[in-house]
Amino acid sequence: PSRAPLPGSTSVRAAFIHVVGDLLQSVGVLVAATIIYFKPQCKIADPISTLFFSIFVLGSTSTILKDVFRVLMEGAPRGVAFEAVKEVLLGVSGVKGAHELHLWALTLSHHAMSAHVAIDASADPEVVLREATIQLRRRFGFAWCTVQVERYREEVA
């Protein structure tokens, strides 16, 4: 489902940085023009102003670019540790093993995961599935959880 951008979303952050960048660039141009107007021999003020602005733009957009590439490359979500997710799965009653664990970011605020969990013979697969999904969503906020439940076998562990 389509949602409006969150206050901390990439679109809002990029727009804010763009506006601040335009403001700083305008101030830089005014300062450089004033310096050049009163001291024509100081024409170096213009390229210096441009250099400072370029450094600001590169620095401020690098975090946005990292976030965008993380989503485009379906990288692991920031702030979600692989081992912590595995521990939650192994902590569910009846689970003896977890494998084929995959985490990825669909957007910066919507994360997905898939995993296979091996359960002992006495565990109810429906209960394990429900409990694992509830815990994963509650603890990590996954938008989509796919948990495949299978019977425990030594060679899978």
Image: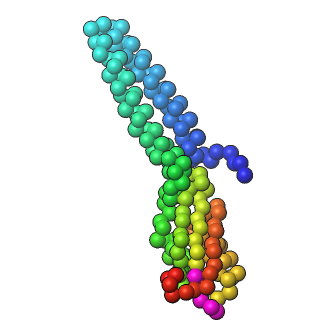
* Residue 121 visible at all: yes
Residue 41 vs residue 37: left or right? left
Q: Residue at 39%, 18% (x, y): give it.
A: 31
> Residue 33 location in percent, x, y?
39, 13
Residue 22 vs residue 32: left or right? right
The quadrant holding residue 130 is: bottom right
**Can you say whether 116 is above or below 81 in the image?**
below
Q: Residue at 41%, 22% (x, y): give it.
A: 28
Count numbered badges in the picture: 0
**Can you say whether 80 is above or below 134 in the image?**
above
**Can you say whether 75 is above or below 42 in the image?**
below
> Residue 26 location in percent, x, y?
46, 21
**Can you say whether 8 is above or below 121 in the image?**
above
The quadrant holding residue 52 is: top left
Q: Residue at 56%, 35% (x, y): give it.
A: 15
The quadrant holding residue 57 is: top left
Q: Is residue 92 located in the magenta-colored stretch of the structure?
A: no
Residue at the outermost left position: 41
Q: Is residue 119 located in the magenta-colored stretch of the structure?
A: yes
Q: How is the image coloured?
A: rainbow
Task: Report the span colored magenta.
Answer: 118-122
Residue at the outermost right position: 1
Residue 49 vs residue 78: left or right? left
Residue at the outermost front position: 155
Residue 56 or 126: which is nearer the viewer? Answer: 126
Q: Residue at 43%, 41% (x, y): give it.
A: 62
> Residue 38 location in percent, x, y?
33, 8
* Residue 93 visible at all: no
* Type of secondary structure dominating the magenta stretch: loop
